[in-house]
Amino acid sequence: MWKRFRSNIGAVIGVVLLVLVIAIAIFAPLIFANSPWQMVQRPFLAPFAMDGLPLGTDTLGRDVAAQLAYGARVSLLVGLVSTLVALLIGVPLGALAGFYGGYVDEGAMRFTEFFQTIPNFALAIVLVAIFEPTLASITLAIAIVSWPPVARLVRAEVMSVRKREFVDAATLAGLSKPRILVRQVLPNTVSPIIVMASLMVATAILLESSLSFLGLGDPNAMSWGYMIGAARTVIRSSWWLSFFPGVAIIITVLALNLIGEGLNDALNPHLSRKGKA
Amino acid sequence: MSVFVAILSRLAKAALTLLAIAVLNFCLLHAAPGDPAVVLAGEAGAADEQMIAQLRERFGLDQPFYIQLAKYVGGVAQLDLGYSFRQNAPVIDLIAERLPATLLLTLTAFVISLVLGIALGVAAAARVGKPQDSLLTTLALLFYATPLYWAALMAVLVFSVWLGWLPGFGYETVGADYTGLARVIDILKHLILPALTLGLFFMAVYMRMTRASMLEVSTADFVKTAKAKGLSGRVIRRRHILRNAILPVVTLAGLQAGQLVGGAVLTETVFAWPGIGRLMFESLAARDYNTILGVFLVSAAMVILFNIVTDIVYRLVDPRIGARA
């Protein structure tokens, strides 16, 4: 499997980019002496205009490069945690629906469909606006709008695994139904869930940045979306203030998408995209 | 007949979904931190005890929860979405005034992204493995990772500020007072950048899907038969592969409609486009919960409508579905 993953150039590029972003996020306090909130110079300093401030300063004279590094922390953290929470909602719901069928399935799927119909970004806005923007409420809101595809995927996987012979064997061996579901069926659905989760982290990062852009970010956490939102009104005079955070978002999201596609090809070789040169 | 029944059942389901969203809205309104009467009084500009008591009575906040819920849902059914104290107008009026601009923007973006996405996906699939295919797939990957609002800002910067080709602000030229055709052209000019940047992400989605789907269908037996009959590659692609490959793309497009409407909040904010997305953004800073929830409900209704329309289109494109239902 690793061999297949490694032979995919896109996936390798994705891993390199992501490792870079993670390293910057972890070592931000070591690389940048300045706090991202601290005013260090006059405002609107252009990139490369002064040593030690490679990307210049923002509207309040704060170090843009330091802000970018600290923003990586928020993006990665919110992306990862919200995906985990979405899995915590979606996996059990989908598994129960697919395994037990009947009314359980019917009820769980109507519930999922309802959440899929609601425009997810609009719901995230409403949730964060009403429960005050904090990292916790943002993470939870993103999880609440992202779990439905997980539930559908797990349901479909469980339904197909449920009919396999080893499940019959486990039933004959006298294992209880919940035990079969958790020990025998679910482990066989892990690889498509991993693929979906890596793509979900990417989407969650986009969602978080969009919320912060609209002013719904945690006021105590520096984030890329906030930086773009704050620089929006000065785009004519200081375009770089909006430009660099956007590039940071694109690199991170692109890396995660490339990794997701690489995992998909490596874990589900029979489903891998045909005609790929 | 069966199509008619199917559409009726879709409509019934849509009504139920909207009802559920209204209930959700009501619960959210009450989950908001703080007493709604105090919030309302604060918004109205006075917060003395007497006023709060009055507001409580006027909005039925002194009544049991289930009666309040029934009243709220009943109001929504009659298009009463509450009152915006910030804007001093019923929420439904605010939305009705701005809905046409949002419909124009989202529908244009939807059509652009679907048409361009399918066309580019077909082009990439026809040249699979060649440089053109690599270029298109790479571009799609990039667009797919680009935040909507950032693409919008950069488009304003490049095409409006630097090149000066297109307006990057508003719905029409303020103070120009164009009429007739001149006004239509003016609005179209203002529409180009918002619609393109809103459609960019979705174009990438549809392109990737179309390409994958084309490649998958091209291995089907009926394609071999068509080749054996001696049909040209172009005819096979158009008449045989595309017609089958397009179905999952249409389904996906219906599902993505919700994201398109959500994305309009961002695009309208950047371009100062006077739609309901911009209304929602303005209400965020003002904590105008009634308006926020009203826009949320209406955008959900739009998504449901989009889905019903794609469902009907789907039935027209694929006669097998009508037969099965």
Image (cartoon, coloured by chain):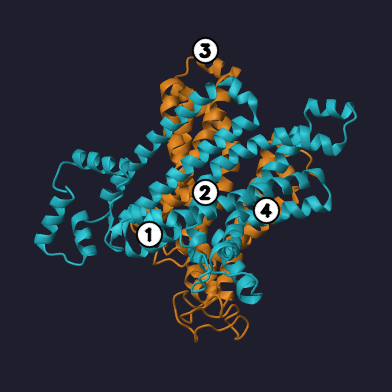
Chain colours: A orange, B cyan
Q: Which residue is mark 2?
A: B259
Q: Which residue is mark 4?
A: B141
CB atoms of marks 2 and 3 within 8 Å: no
Disc 3 with disc 4 on a shared chain:
no
Q: Earlier in the sequence, mark 1 or mark 3?
A: 1
Observer-nearest of B163 and B65: B163
CB atoms of marks 4 and 1 within 8 Å: no
Does residue B221 lie above or below A30 as drawn? above
Question: Residue A172, which numbered label?
Answer: 3
Task: Assign a secondary structure to mark 1.
Answer: loop
Circle 1: residue type: Thr
Question: Which mark lies nearer to you, 1 or 3?
Answer: 1
Location of residue B241 in the rendering, given as x and y in whole percent from the top left corner: 76, 34
Q: Is residue A134 left or right of residue A51?
A: left
Circle 4: residue type: Leu
Task: Assign a secondary structure to mark 3.
Answer: helix
How would you rate the neighbour count of disc 1 (Cα within 10 Å): few for under 14, some for 14-19, many for 20 or more?
Answer: some
Q: Which residue is mark 1?
A: A134
Disc 4 with disc 1 on a shared chain:
no
Q: Which residue corresponds to the image point at 53% horizontal and 21% vertical from the top-left?
A: B2
Observer-nearest of B126 and B182: B182
Letter of the chain that mark 2 sits on in the rendering:
B
How many marks are shown on the rendered structure?
4
Question: Which mark lies nearer to you, 2 or 3?
Answer: 2
Q: Is residue B38 left or right of residue A231?
A: left
Letter of the chain that mark 1 sits on in the rendering:
A
Disc 2 with disc 4 on a shared chain:
yes
Location of residue A209 in the rendering, given as x and y in whole percent from the top left corner: 50, 60
